[in-house]
Amino acid sequence: MKGNPQQVGAMDKTPLYATLLWVCCAAVPLAGADATTPGPWRSLLNDDSAPDWRGWKEPGLPAGWRVAG
C-alpha cells in the first residue's frame, strides 16, 4: 500500500459512514410517525361561552373572564 496509513484506513471506512448516514436519514420520518389517527375537530369555544375551558382548580372560567366575539 502506498501513502499514509491513516488516510488509507479512513478511505476504507467511507462506505460504512455513508451507509450509517443513509440509515439514520431514512429513519427520521419513521420517528415522527403517529400510530393513531386524530379525532374529529372539536371547537373549544361556542358563540358566547367556553364550556371546555376552565380555570386552575375551578369548574368553569375564572371570575371576570368572558368570551368576546
Image (cartoon, helix red, strand yellow):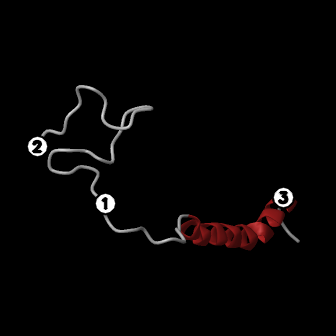
Q: Mark 3 or mark 1: which is in front?
A: 1
Q: Secondary structure at mark 2?
A: loop
Label 3 sits on residue = 6
The quarter holding residue 25 reads bottom right
Residue 52 placement, left or right of 27 = left
The three-letter code of the residue at mark 3 reads Gln
Cβ–Cβ below 8 Å for labels 3 and 1? no
Residue 40 position (above or below residue 43): below
Q: Earlier in the sequence, mark 3 or mark 1?
A: 3
Residue sitting at the far front:
59
Q: Which residue is mark 1?
A: 42
Asked which secondary structure carries label 3, the reply is helix
Q: Please provide percent x and percent y for residue 19.
A: 69, 73
Q: Tell me whether circle 1 and circle 2 mark residues in contact (CB < 8 Å).
A: no
Q: Amino acid at mark 1?
A: Arg
| Left or right: 69 as drawn, with respect to 64 | left
Instruction: Give the distance between the C-alpha atoms of the residues marked 1 and 2, in whole angstroms.
Output: 18 Å
